[in-house]
Amino acid sequence: MSQTKLVITAAVRDELPISFIKECGCPVVTTKALRSGICGSFRKGREGIVFVITGVGKEKSRQAAEAICEYLSPLAVVNVGTCGLNSPTYSFGHNGPGIFVASETKTPEGVLRCHLPLPFPLPEEVKPQKAWIESLERPLLKHSPCIGPLVDMEAGFQNQIFSRKNIPFSCLKVASDTCSDSTRRDYKNSLQRVRSLLQGILGFIDTKDLSPSISVIIPVRNRYRRLERCIRSVLAQTYKPKEVIVIDDASRPPIASMLPGDVVDKINLIRLQERRGVSFARNQGIRKATGDWIALLDSDDEWTPGKLSNQVAYLQANPFFEILQCEEIWIRNGKRVNRCKHHEKEEGWIFEKSLGLCAISPSAVLLRKDLLLDTYGPFDERFPACEDYELWLRITRQKPVGLNPEPDLIRYGGHSDQLSARYPAMDRFRVAALLKALENEDNPELIKSITAALKQRLLILYTGAQKRQKLHDASIYQEILGHLEAKRHVSWTNYPILLKKYP
């Protein structure tokens, strides 16, 4: 099976900045080439992103989509190129370049939702508008008020195939004409502008000079011996981070007095004068970080020397990921243990898997700093524990997650100062996180999935409270269950017990 993780489709080569794409090393193929078995000849390390020229129209679009499913089976597909803007008054000169992300596609067979947002980062200056796109079997040569705001001859037909295969499909289009008698002339005159805009949008595929500046964030309280081992594993990395920031969460005595001088000299040590918890400590470190990427590390874990270099190499091949993690080794009470089947990590759109368990290990993760500060973060400091579970729900709902296969994280468990050992009924925190996610969800299918996960955890909490004769707690869990069964709105902030530190 091909190692392709992202496929970008376009109807014709003229709509793509082909020279730029090939210079970046990404394959550009046709449907016929796919069916001939060309994937086996992709240059190793550059097969992560493949561009497919589909041809124009319903049948060619469907045939291309079927070939992509059969020979590439990617994590996501994005259709790019031109579209017609079904408007008699739009002026490209006054209203910007006309870049659109389709919220849904429509064909004679029906309407399908598109996967939003796009699976790759957009340049800051690109602010696409959302609109639905109607795919026609013939070009629209005259404005029609009964047809959607955007029209093309490919996106909707591709979406039909990919939706059946559960492959997330997105659509980013540049308007080339306004559906008039001059459509064909306007289209040809727009091609240079379209290619230029798409080259800027696709700039992330240029990895020739990819050397991400990485800030490592380590929060700690009192774990002196384990912390030294942890820090030395970072200092031993073959790909050197820009900085190592250690946040001392009011340890007694201070961390600085307990670490060897050769370690203290190589880190940026920030001491909090009063205990604020792991979320606050991590957030402080992230705000102080000067790197573009953040690598989190818990003070009781360590990395193999190749952890960061392996993740950078992974990004070289798959540069659309904005968050990724590595595989890990578990050590519990001094002995290596095997993970259960349901703990196996997955790559791609893992939001639904993340509902059932924390599918990302903080110490394994590498992600863009702006995801944590400007887009989906920071950590919610109201959560005494499971703060990572809550943050990953926010991020995985919107972004695919990469997985570097090397087991470069060594996780140690079984010691008494782990958060999981400190707080009873940990599912309370996960229920709060799920209720928070439910409040912000508008996808009917995901609402069902979140609600099912909530009911399962609330039933466990209710049964446990009944068994321990905590009847007041049991009545609250039962009340929330009742609201969910009746499909009534539930605000997680109305139930302080969910985030109470010592129930």
Image: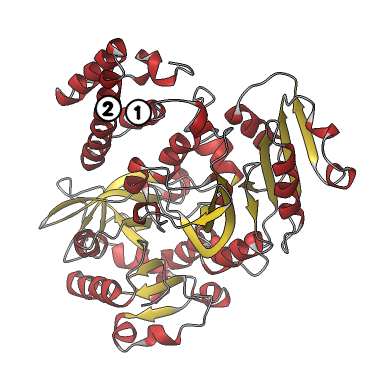
Q: Nearer the viewer, mark 2 or mark 1?
A: 2
The secondary element bearing badge 1 is classed as helix
Q: Which residue is mark 1?
A: 431
Left or right: 222 as drawn, with respect to 475: right
Q: Which residue is mark 2?
A: 458
Q: Are marks 2 and 1 in contact (CB under 8 Å)?
A: yes
Q: Position of residue 488 (x, y in %)?
A: 20, 20
Q: Quadrant of residue 471?
A: top left
First-in-chain label (2 vs 1) = 1
Please rate how many residues cluster around mark 1, counting C-alpha atoms within 10 Å: few if below 14, some from 14 to 19, many from 20.
many
Image quarter hosting the C terminus: top left
Left or right: 277 as drawn, with respect to 262: left
The secondary element bearing badge 2 is classed as helix
Q: Position of residue 59 (x, y in %)?
A: 17, 74
Q: Quadrant of residue 156?
A: bottom left
Query: Foreground residue, 390 or 472?
Result: 472
Q: Residue at x 72, y 60 (%)?
A: 237
Furthest-top residue in view?
472
Answer yes or no: is residue 387 visible.
yes
| Residue type highlighted by circle 2 | Leu
Q: Position of residue 62 (x, y in %)?
A: 20, 71
Q: Residue at x 27, y 71 (%)?
A: 69
